[in-house]
Amino acid sequence: MGNVHSCVVASLSLFSVYLFYVHVYRAHRVLKSSVLHSDGLPSSAYLCVKYVLRASTRTPGRLYADAEKRHVVFTLLNCRLQTPVLRRFCSLAGYGWDYPDSEYRDVPLCFPEFLCSRLTLILLTDGNFRLSPAGLVRLRQTLKTLQPVDELKKGPFTLQVEVVEYRQVDAGVEVDVRLSAASRSGCLVWESVLTLLSKDRRLQPLQAGRRSQQDDGRPDEPEKVKQVELRVPGTSGLQCLCSFSVFSSLPRLPGSRAAPPLWMLSVCLAEIEKHRGVGVLTAPVSVRVQYRNRLTAPAEVTLRFWETSGGEEGSRPPRGFGFLMERHGASHLVGLISRSSPSG
């Protein structure tokens, strides 16, 4: 009996050592480099623990000193597009599970950000990232495609995330994070710049008042506006919390979830494409978005979109589409789709 007990204890000890090596030690060694390989990324469990530890030692809204003055950037090599992952994204994001099978349709514009999710979490939990990873709020985003995203299907590609700039603002600290995807030839295919806010909780009343003055106004809409009613499922936040947006947070109300910002944007672009054709989002294209009021699911929302025509000759912006997601008169997302030059 004693021998059996000893064997069980020894087996458990060896198993514990193995788990420590796989999920902690190896991940720690991998993250000492800023250039990573797709087959050697740290596990989600390791990154979640690291996220909690980093969040528990840093206060939101405070910009911490960077003694090393190191540029925070991570590159992921040898990525390959996996059809099951793409189909799952399309199914959740308003396109339909069979979307990628159409030869006339590009990969959805938001999909590369979905692929960057774990790499972004690595950046936010890095010791040289100067903010708390907890409580980051997505304010603005600019997406650009210089080549069709479909280029990523043709072979191994490269993803990169980097911190561009920190800014002290009245409400706390803003940070710009750039995400990008390059094809197998090294040419830039897609990029997105996210502006995130780390809110100073001591200034919450001031920030709320300032934001309400700036964001409550509705954009000017022309007469011909297409309106679509959409349902935000109650499971959107639960299913997409980690994969769609590492910047989402669970609401305090039990039984409800916040719709991830990336999910909201992807659904808007999917509906616009369904009604106006795939050419609206064919590269080269640029999408600028402002995220406003938080959207709690489940909910019924209204998507409005309209064609922009510009102003006087020589000064008018590129022809495109404006769009707005709202609920009960409160806007949650406002954006503009415009054509870009091939040079970016």
Image (cartoon, rainbow, N blue to C red):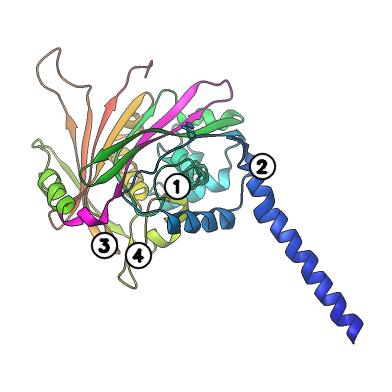
Closer to viewer: mark 4 or mark 2: 2
How far apart marks 3 and 2 lie (CA) works out to 39 Å
Q: Residues within 10 Å of mark 3 (few under 14, many from 20)?
A: few
| Residue of label 4 | 234
Residue at the location (23% across, 56% down)? 202
Q: Main secondary structure of the magenta part?
A: strand
Which of the labelled discs sits on residue 299, or is there none? 3
Relative height, residue 147 to residue 287 (above, below): above
Is 19 within the magenta?
Answer: no
Q: Amino acid at mark 3?
A: Ala
- Of helix, strand and loop, which one carries label 2? helix
Closer to viewer: mark 3 or mark 2: 2
Left or right: residue 48 versus residue 216 is right
Which of the labelled discs sits on residue 90, or is there none? 1
Q: Amino acid at mark 4?
A: Gly
- Of helix, strand and loop, which one carries label 1? helix
Q: Earlier in the sequence, mark 4 or mark 2?
A: 2
Left or right: residue 294 versus residue 245 is left
